[in-house]
Amino acid sequence: MRKQRIAPLLFNFFAGLKNFSRPAGKAAAVLLLLILSGACREKSPPHEPPPEIQHIDVFEDEPVQEAEPAAEEQPAVSGGTISLSYQSQRSLSSFSGRLPAFGVNFSEINPVNYQNADPEILRQMGAEQYLIAFFSGEKLYREGNYDSAIAEYNRTLRLNAGFAEAIISRGNAWLRKGEFSRAIEDYTRLINMGISRPELYNYRGYAWEGRNEVTRAIEDYSRAIALNANYTDALINRAHALYEKGEYDRVIEDCDRILRLEPRNAAIWNRRGSAWYRKEDDDRAIRDFSEAIRIRGDYALAYHNRGNAWYNKGEYDSALADLNRAIAINPSFTSAYISRGNVFRMMGNHESAAADFASGGR
């Protein structure tokens, strides 16, 4: 019988959902974007490892606790949840039309080339009021002023109730504010309008997860993946939700798919290692944590997790080396102190163990 795991294991939270990026083809106003630039919410690079939020899984009958992210990790959404990203999937097909005064058909314009549309210039160009309100909302969203952005999206929808871009943008703003039920309402409204964009299901899945409705979240992530089999963000989010449910075989399957798409995603190597760890396969866990560290040499979380796996194998010197490294990278990593304290205790160094437990708040 395997000995009880005492050291806590931190696992990477997904991710991703990387940032809520604005879909490229933001809009009809891409129109006026000819002179300035179009409507596209900021996007993080498609292959950048997602920001992480950590959970501590404590194995001594203690409740699961949430830890603050390590210093080097910047979650896109506060409140101890996961983060969302969006890789542009929209086209301008629903926005084709002609620019007022110029007679230029903007249906063929690549919106990625136009950014930060200026609502004042749109006014000068005679754009319709609902578009001016929409782009004003987009500007406020980019500035992080979500309440004012929502007010502009509401004004847009009073002028044009069926403008889908404003509904998804408002849903994203609700999501940023942590108002998950309102976000779900907006995403569901779009879905009921017959709009089957994979990101809508991905976002709604995230909102369900925010309400602790993990089964519904998995269903929506799966719908997103059915629409786009290579939708990395939805795969990342589903892997996280499955981990929460303890379905580690399915976590590993999703991580396998993600790593075929993003082989240098250190966070996913770490997550798959966490799933192997939960399945008590420490050798495979160590291999995955090691790959995460090879890709990202300052990955304190992966050093911590690999240290725990070495601990479970009784290889205390290796465990101590990894935990020392985790603490050197992140001196405020309290769980690493607790894990190292357990190693010291097993090695008979009770004084150092006591000091680490004190540093870890145990």
Image: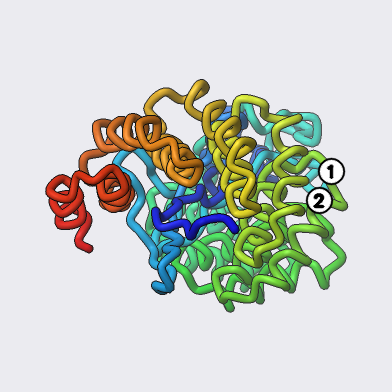
Q: For the point 72% across and 46% down, which residue is it?
A: 252
Side (left or right) of 69 relative to 360: right
The image quadrant where one finds the C terminus is bottom left
User: x%, y% of residue 36?
Assistant: 53, 30
Q: How is the image coloured?
A: rainbow
User: x%, y% of residue 270?
Assistant: 55, 39
Image position of 223 with respect to 211: above or below: above
The amino acid type found where label 2 is placed reads Ile
The image quadrant where one finds the N terminus is bottom right
The residue pinned by badge 1 equals: 229
User: x%, y% of residue 146?
Assistant: 43, 62
Find out whether the residues at labels 1 and 2 contact each other: C-beta distance under 8 Å: yes
Side (left or right) of 22 relative to 311: right
Whether residue 194 appears in this view of the structure is yes
User: x%, y% of residue 177?
Assistant: 44, 66
Side (left or right) of 337 relative to 50: left
Side (left or right) of 320 relative to 20: left
Q: CA distance from mark 1 to mark 2?
A: 5 Å
| Of 131 and 306, the residue lying toward us | 306
The residue pinned by badge 2 equals: 225
Whether residue 51 appears in this view of the structure is no
Q: For the point 20% across and 50% down, which residue is it?
A: 353
| Of 81 and 36, the residue lying toward us | 81
Q: For the point 67% across and 33% down, which residue is it?
A: 111
Image position of 324 with respect to 355: above or below: above
The amino acid type found where label 1 is placed reads Ala
Tell me if mark 2 has few (under 14), some (14-19) or many (20+) residues whose alpha carbon lies within 10 angstroms of its own.
Answer: many
| Numbered disc 1: secondary structure | loop
Tell me if mark 1 has few (under 14), some (14-19) or many (20+) residues whose alpha carbon lies within 10 angstroms of its own.
Answer: some
| Numbered disc 2: secondary structure | helix
Image position of 217 with respect to 52: above or below: below
